[in-house]
Image (cartoon, grey):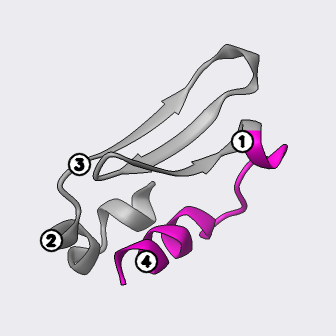
C-alpha cells in the first residue's frame, strides 16, 4: 500500500480506493468504485508491487 500512497501521480488520479481484508480468504482491491483485484477470483495473494502495477494500468 505504501507504494500506492506515496506516488503523487497516482494520488491525483484516485478519487477513492479500498482494501477489503477479511476472514475466509477474501482480499479485494478497488479504486474509484471498480474492483481491480480479488484473491477469491485469482486463488492467490498479490505479489509485492502487483497492486501498483494493476492500478497504474487501470488509470491509463
Q: Is mark 1 on a helix, strand or loop?
A: helix
In percent of the image, x 38 and y 64: which residue is there? Answer: 4
CB-based contact (under 8 Å), mark 1 and mark 3: no
Q: Distance of mark 2 from mark 1, alpha carbons? A: 27 Å
Horizontal and vertical percent position of residue 27: 62, 35
Q: What's the magenta region?
A: 41-60
Q: Which of marks 1 and 3 is nearer the N terminus?
A: 3
Q: Is mark 3 on a helix, strand or loop?
A: loop
CB-based contact (under 8 Å), mark 3 and mark 4: no
Q: Which mark, by number, is residue 16?
A: 3
Task: Say whether residue 19 is magenta.
Answer: no
Q: Is residue 47 above or below residue 12?
A: above
Residue holding disc 1: 39
Horizontal and vertical percent position of residue 52: 49, 69
Q: Is mark 4 on a helix, strand or loop?
A: helix
Residue holding disc 2: 12
Amino acid at each position: 500500500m505504501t507504494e500506492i500512497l506515496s506516488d503523487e501521480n497516482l494520488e491525483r488520479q484516485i478519487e477513492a480506493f479500498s482494501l477489503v481484508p477479511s476472514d475466509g480468504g477474501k482480499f479485494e482491491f478497488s479504486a474509484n468504485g471498480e474492483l481491480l483485484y480479488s484473491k477469491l477470483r485469482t486463488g492467490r495473494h498479490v505479489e509485492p508491487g502487483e497492486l501498483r502495477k494493476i492500478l497504474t494500468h487501470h488509470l491509463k
